[in-house]
Image (tube, rainbow, N blue to C red):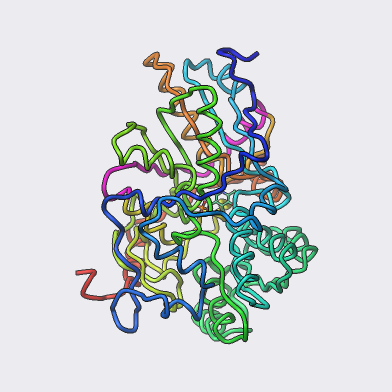
Amino acid sequence: MAANNIPYKIYLSENEIPKQWYNLNAAMKDKHDPFLNPATGKPCTKDDLRAVFCDDCIDQELNFTDLYIDIPEGIRDFYRMYRPAPLVRAYCLEKALGTPAEIYYKFEGNNTSGSHKLNSAAAQAYYAKKQGLKSITTETGAGQWGTALSMASAFYGLDLTVYMVKVSSEQKPYRKEVMRTYGAQVVPSPSDTTNAGRKILQEFPGTGGSLGCAISEAVEKAVTSDSCRYVLGSVLDHVVLHQSVIGLEAKAALDKYGVEIDTVIGCVGGGSNFGGLIAPFMGDKIAGKNDIDFIGVEPASCPSLTRGKYVYDFCDSAKTTPLARMYTLGCGFMPSASHAGGLRYHGMSPIVSKLYHDGYMRAVAVEQTKVFEAAEYFARTEGILPAPESSHAILAAIDEAIACKKTGQKKKILFGLTGTGYFDMAAYKQYNDGTMTDSIPSDADLAKGFASIPDIPQNK
Ligand SMILES: *Cc1c(COP(=O)(O)O)cnc(C)c1O
């Protein structure tokens, strides 16, 4: 089957698991704007962040100089349980499409948590343990991050409380049980266990919750509990850093066969898998070594890149976190109950935002029913049942490959297949029953979200 001697799966060996992460912040000539302390309006210092985040993660967050950062052996020990992740040449998909393009995907769903999120969960749990903390808190939307962190917390011996967006906890009761099996305590958010939760419940009774709201609850719990810190599964620079193992492994595998990629595609929620997948390729593009077309794919229901504003905003809806300059729909934006739970976030990684703003990449927004059409096509051709989030990237890759059919271009396309969809069967059922709808916010809906963006001098 393997034309050009490229196998269906390109495996790396265990000792080819990266020994260092790739720090895009160091590769970028123009750095993104600094986080601001909302109380002072000044750039955040390490001390500002210490009450919330682990020390090593703060150091990584504010590191704009070291292109490579060592991965501690204690983290590589965990990575060895499920990495290296395979890089697949999608021969079956190419054949079905009849495209002259070559399609490759990096599959991150080969672990029980089912997604790439374990790459950063392992690192953050390791650093929390190293610092002598007893517990950590977090939020989870679709549940992948909470599951990943539960696995990592069990491995490193930490107590974990997960605030799970209420609609997701109702749609995915079994996710919750996976987390509890790994020892986590799961609280549906908004809850009455925090001030932030109670306030939101008062304002929006009956709300299904949002990631921003769950973040507020988790942060509050962390700063009011002893020896506890908050950990975040996306958006922040250190999470993008940890996810660079995806891009580094993909590049190492492609380099073995001398494959030079033309297009790199990833879904974007908070931007971490995309930032990690593109990291070493983007570093080369910034250095003038390639001219890769980078495409971030977001849901039309939560279009932060394609319809958001590039301003300073809070990372959570209770306005407790530092301010980040990013593409945002406003921290008060409430997305409709879309199934691509992992992509329902109002903001976007400051790194990805800056790259987009400076024209190093482009973004497309796609509708949910088209995404599921692509998901089923992919399942039937390549065999893997993809996560709805990942299927955004599948759709864009298929569109690119079909375009190649028309032009005859033999583009080499790489996309990130971030996870499996086993816990998304309610969404697949809706799609199969023909009851799934697309919900695209009107300009008036967006205006409501934009009104929640802080009115600070930097935003004028
Ligand atoms: C969380 C998640 C995403 C989106 O998060 P990013 O930080 O944008 O990567 C994408 N795919 C899957 C499977 C997820 O679980």
At x 52%, y 25%, the residue is 103
Of residue 58 and residue 137, the one placed in the foreground of this image is 58
Q: Position of residue 424 (x, y in %)?
A: 67, 49
| x, y percent for residue 98 | 53, 15
**105 in relation to 96, above or below:** below
Q: Horizontal and vertical percent for residue 198? A: 56, 84
Quadrant location of the N terminus in the rendered image: top right
Q: Residue furthest right?
A: 181
Labels in figure, total: 0
Q: Position of residue 115 (x, y in %)?
A: 63, 49
Between 336 and 385, the residue placed more toward the observer is 385
Relative placement, left or right, of 278 versus 82 is left
Q: Is residue 78 left or right of residue 57?
A: right
Secondary structure mostly seen in the magenta stretch: helix
Q: Does the magenta-highlighted stretch encompass residue 34?
A: no
Is 137 situated left or right of 440 in this image? Answer: right
Residue ID at (59%, 64%): 124
- Residue 357 in magenta? yes
Q: Name the quadrant containing residue 376.
A: top right
Query: Which residue does the image show at 41% across and 57% down from the upper left?
Result: 348
Asked whether, in this view, residue 383 is left or right of residue 36, the answer is right
Q: Which residues are magenta?
A: 355-382
Q: Quadrant of the C terminus?
A: bottom left
